[in-house]
Amino acid sequence: MKYLVVGGSGYIGSHMVKHLLRAGHEVVVADTAAADPGIEWVELDIANAHALDTLFGDCHFDAVFHFASFIQVGESVSDPGKYYQNNVAATLTLLNAMVRAGIRHLIFSSTAAVYGDPQYVPIDEQHPKAPINPYGRSKWMVEQILQDFDRAYGLKSVCLRYFNAAGADPDGLLGECHEPETHLIPLILQAAAGRREAITVFGHDYDTPDGSCIRDYVHVADLASAHELAVEYLSKGGTTTAFNLGNGLGFSVQQVIDTARDVTGRQINVVEAARRDGDPARLVADATRARLVLGWQPRFDSLEQIVRHAWEWELQYPWR
Ligand code: UFG
């Protein structure tokens, strides 16, 4: 198969590209940032309809994987225009170009943020969608647009609602590197590596056993395998749908820090701070549907493995 990976230079997208290439597929990355050497890369912003038409005129793609979005919840609150422009409007430009080119299959990166404050955990796909910030709303808007595009134009899609994507390529070739970094595990490991004074724990008075927030960490390599299964599902005639991706295991911020101390053998200083706005106490996935319908079987379902791979990446790139 020949696939276009939009946002294929980013954290999850680059793991996806490696996974698809290893499975023997042809891959083109479309991204504003360069892909790794040896990967076919088109410098392209999906807000540019003309550039998309040119690309789709030159190459036939069996499906598109769409990873290109802004992901910081706090920034989405202070600058919603940026989020709706990129995450919704530019995505719409991509979808219209796909329809013009007759590309029928899309795998879309969605998020647990579409659910908002959970009414129950673990969260299944039927849980009410009530996002509490522009980031989550932007993803939910696209999910609804995709349902309309299926009805009107026959564009079939799978939305994959990630819980907390984490870890790094088990071969040590890729890892997580956001600028600025806001995610818990890389920040903890930067503290372990001595490149950060301490990790700040946002909130220690939640209604959880140790008072810190509970999240469902899912390995980035397992996310990649779920995407491949999702595109196979569409190629076999699967209908437009959404799946949660998580391990169904909740770990508190404190448990992640303790695991990182064990894995790294390093001291990790902790500073307690107030709650961060918009953080629910507990987000845990019920990903039964992905296992049953797609046959998804995460390989790295222990927090220790996730942190170990992230640490191996961190150690390999001390210059970052
Ligand atoms: N946390 C800290 N200190 C930090 C950073 C994070 O205590 O320095 C805590 C957060 O409060 C949260 C947990 O660690 O309880 C995980 O935080 P992350 O920022 O790593 O991840 P989030 O759960 O906030 O965000 C994830 C995705 C987002 C997505 C969101 C949906 O990374 O892209 O889930 O709920 F929007």
Image: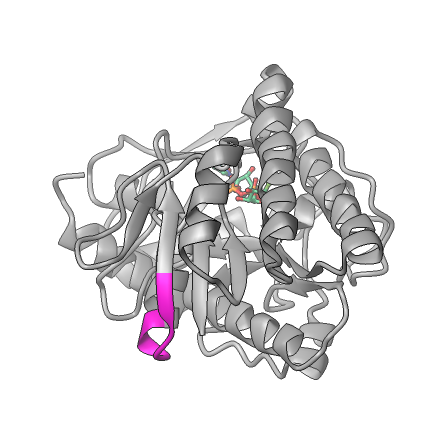
Q: How many marks?
A: 0
Q: Which residues are magenta?
A: 21-27
Which residue is pictured at 75% across the width and 64% down the height? 240
Please tell me whether residue 43 is drawn above or below residue 248 in the rendered image.
above
Task: Tell me if 137 is positioned left or right of 189 in this view.
Answer: right
Q: Nearer the viewer, residue 36 or 11?
A: 36
Which residue is pictured at 49% across the width and 31% down the height? 48
Q: Nearer the viewer, residue 56 or 206?
A: 56
Task: Tell me if 266 is positioned left or right of 296 in this view.
Answer: left
Q: Nearer the viewer, residue 261 or 289?
A: 289
**Which percent across, then down, holds residue 78?**
60, 15
- Farthest residue, direction left: 319
**Which percent across, then down, holds residue 81?**
62, 18
Residue 203 in sight: no
**Which percent across, then down, holds residue 201?**
49, 35
Instruction: Please tell me in which quarter of the rendered image ligand 1 is found.
Output: top right
Magenta stretch: includes residue 245: no
